[in-house]
Image (cartoon, rainbow, N blue to C red):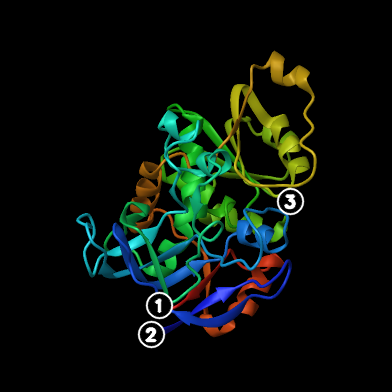
Amino acid sequence: MTVMQEVVVPSADADWELRDTEVPEPGPGQVLIRVHACGICGTDVWLTEAKLSFGPFPLFPGHEGVGEVVAVGAGVTSRAVGDRVGICTLQRGCGHCAWCTRAEPLDFVTAANCPNAVVTGMTARGAHADYLAVPDSATVLLPDGLSYELAAPVLCVGYTAWAGLRRADPRPGDRIAVSGIGGLGHLAVQYAKAAGFKTVAITRSEDKRRLALDLGANVVVGSGEELRAAGGADVLLATNNSNAAVVDAMQGVNPRGRVVLMGIAFDEFTVTTMPVVMNSLKILGSAHNGTQYLVEALELAAAGKVIPMVEVYGKDRIADAYRRAAEGKARFRAVVSYA
C-alpha cells in the first residue's frame, strides 16, 4: 500500500486533522492528481460547523484544489501526465434526474437540485489531501505562469466573483459596487476593475478602506446611503456574510439596477418591496454558473489583472489554517500547500 495523508473532520465543529490513507488508483475516465495546494473556503467552515450539510461526518474537505496529473485511467484522452489542473467543485450530476435531464451547466445549482450530485469535498473526498482521483471532465487546465497557491482560491471564490459579475450582464458605463471586502469581495473588486468598470467598494472597516483603493476601487463608501450620495451603482455584488449589510447597501442601487447575491449569510434577508418594485430592481442569486467562467477567471489571474491575497500554510499546520479561516482572521484566503 502506498500511503498518503488527507484531511479529515471527524465530527461537527471538530479540529481538522491529518490521517494516513491509501493513495487512490484512477479508475476509467479518471485522472490521479498530485495536489499542490488547496484553499479553505467559507463553505468549508459552514460544513465543519454543520450549518450546511451534504452528508454525515466524517467530512473530507477541500474544493479549491489544484495540482499535477500524475496518472490517467483507461479511456482518458483529454488530460495527460504532467498537466497542471484545477479540480472543479461540481464533478458531475447523476445524469437522469429531472434536473440533470434539463442539460444545465455544471455548477452549484446542480449540487442543490440533483439528489446524487458528486461534489468535491462534500459528497466526495476533497482536495485537502496529497492525492485525489477525479473524472478528467471535472478538471480545468491551469494557465501557464499562474502559481498553484494563487490558482487555488480562483477555483471557488474567484470563480464565484467573476461568474456573479457576468450574471449581472453589466453594460458599458455601468458602475459596479462591491459590498464587503473579504475573501470574496477583495476579488470581486479586482474582477470588476479588470473588466473596465468604475468600481465602488462598500466597507465599514477603516483598515479595509485603503486596501480597497489599492485593489482598484475608484471610490470607497461606508453604507448604502453614502453609495447613493456618491452616484449610486448599477450593479451591486453582494459578497457579505451579513444580509443586513446587503439590505443597507441596496439603498444605493440605481433604478433598474441588479443586486447579485453571492455571499452566504444566515440572518434574515428582509427587503421592503416598494423600492424594489418602483425602481424595477433585479435580485439575483449566483453560484458558479458554468465552467467557462472559471476558465475566464483563471486567465485574468494568470494575466496579473487579479491577484488573490493568500496566507500559505504547510499541511502540518492544517488545524491552525482552518481555525484562522473560521475566525475570519485570514487575509484573505488560507491556502494549504501539499507540495
Q: Quadrant of residue 67?
A: bottom left
Compared to residue 145, the image places residue 320 above or below, namely: below
Mark 2 neighbour density, 10 Å: few (under 14) some (14–19) many (20 or more): few
In the rendering, at what x and y percent does residue 221 appear?
68, 44
Cα gap from disc 2 to disc 3, whole angstroms = 51 Å
Label 3 belongs to which residue?
204
Label 2 belongs to which residue?
2
Question: Can you see residue 104?
Answer: yes
In the rendering, at what x and y percent does residue 122 appear?
56, 58
In the rendering, at what x and y percent does residue 4 appear?
44, 82
Q: What residue type is labelled 3?
A: Arg
Label 1 belongs to which residue?
23
Residue at the spot 47% in from the left edge and 43% down from the top edge: 107
User: Mark 2 or mark 1, which has the lower sequence index?
Assistant: 2
Residue at the spot 53% in from the left edge and 57% down from the top edge: 214
Tags 2 and 3 touching, CB below 8 Å: no
133 on left or right of 211: left
Tags 2 and 1 touching, CB below 8 Å: yes
Mark 1 neighbour density, 10 Å: few (under 14) some (14–19) many (20 or more): some
User: Mark 2 or mark 3, which has the lower sequence index?
Assistant: 2
Q: Quarter of the image containing the N terminus?
A: bottom left
Q: What residue type is labelled 1?
A: Val
Q: What residue type is labelled 2?
A: Thr
The residue tagged with tag 1: helix, strand or loop?
A: loop
Cα gap from disc 3 to disc 1, whole angstroms = 47 Å
